[in-house]
Amino acid sequence: MTTDSAPDRSVTTPAEELSASADETKKDARSDPTAPGRLAQSALVEDIEFLTARARATGSARANFALEPLGLRVREYSVLTVARSGLRPSQRELAEFLHLDPSQVVALVDELERRGAVQREPDQRDRRSKVIVTTRAGERLGVQADGRIKQAEDDSMAPLSNSEREQLKALLRRIAFTG
Amino acid sequence: MTTDSAPDRSVTTPAEELSASADETKKDARSDPTAPGRLAQSALVEDIEFLTARARATGSARANFALEPLGLRVREYSVLTVARSGLRPSQRELAEFLHLDPSQVVALVDELERRGAVQREPDQRDRRSKVIVTTRAGERLGVQADGRIKQAEDDSMAPLSNSEREQLKALLRRIAFTG
DNA sequence: TATTGTTATACTCTATAACTATA
DNA sequence: TATAGTTATAGAGTATAACAATA
């Protein structure tokens, strides 16, 4: 399963490393004033998976902190927001769109329903399916949450201009649903 | 703690919702051919926290799948990659840069050290600190992993042109370290 | 036979607190 | 007194399998 068959544990030196592959990747990273700290010279800052992971780690921490006074977490907010769209999503659709397991959606809808923010409605055309709709209380909760999330987003994207923010979101939208 | 004091559980209708706020947000989302499924009309597709969460969910799933034959997970790969930079990061620096708790770094370095991929070295200038360096075996493992991660990244960004990919990464870099 | 929601379960990831050795 | 690494522990997030009702 692992590749540790080779007993070669000799250590590489920094000099070897730095001279070995003098690609422009590291030069770009080094000249980028926005990535703080000396580790920003690492090739990782060219890794899209790392960048999205880092951005969402700080972002969702911020979002959860912003929603905390409302007793909401970011995953509940996402369910509530889709429910508020008026699109009458089924739980299965929510799972797929939010990249959650169907069993997780059950728990999230349970919690929102317990708070009186959403309701399960029978689907006319398929009695297996349940459609999630918001209540008036859920609407009000959603509006409050929107304001706080808006502020969090403003903090997250503070380094970017308005057009850059739109650009970033447009690019992210195009890769966010390819799984 | 919660805001469910109001017993108002009357349900809002789709018609109300859709006519209530006819903002351009929904129009943009609707005309975006890249976000699949009817739920892409939801206001969530304008939410940066949602987009980064969605992108990293699919991305890290892809990355973990790509690394699985090497017995690596994406978090171990990130530690290994920074170690390979030749920058001699301390565990504390790794924690901050990778947005991990110091205790998590201990476990990740333990695992990589057990495999003979990295080593802890004493820091000359501060005997509390330990510096993480790669071994030759770790170098080889890293090279193999790089290739697989490169392929995963190529899949993740398939919808984008080369210049768009660079644009996206540059924008992400500017917001990824604001936490 | 396949799918929706559901329950149960386990595994990964993340956050917190306390301890030790150094500074 | 503060900081780096470590240990322990609990909580949040994620993945899988099985089941009942319905298609």
Image (spheres, coloured by chain):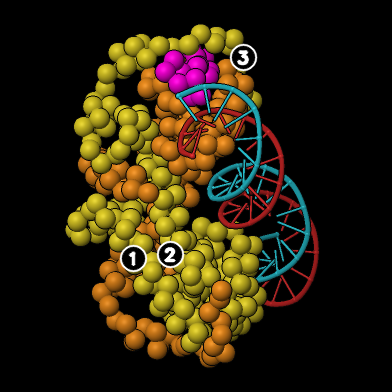
Chain colours: A orange, B yellow, C red, D cyan
- Residue A129 lies in the magenta-colored region: yes
Label 2 marks a residue whose chain is: B
Decide which of tag 1 and tag 3 comes sooner along the chain.
Answer: 3
Q: Which residues are magenta?
A: A119-137
Residue depicted at 40% across the width and 78% down the height:
B143
Task: Tell me, for residue B66, which label it has, or none.
Answer: 2
Q: Relative to residue B118, is residue A43 depicted above or below?
A: above
- Residue B45 lies in the magenta-colored region: no
Q: Are marks 3 and 2 on the same chain?
A: yes
Label 3 marks a residue whose chain is: B
Label 1 – label 2 distance at C-alpha: 8 Å
How many marks are shown on the rendered structure? 3
Label 1 marks a residue whose chain is: B
Q: Is residue A170 left or right of residue B173?
A: left
> Where residue B173 sits in the image (x, y, percent)?
34, 57
Q: Amino acid at mark 1?
A: Gln
> Where residue A98 sits in the image (x, y, percent)?
44, 38
Residue bearing the label numbered 3: B5
Q: Which residue is at the front of the view, A71 or B15?
A: B15
Q: Relative to residue B120, is residue B18 depicted above or below?
A: above
Residue bearing the label numbered 1: B151
Q: Which residue is at the front of the view, B90 or B71?
A: B71
Element class at badge 1: helix
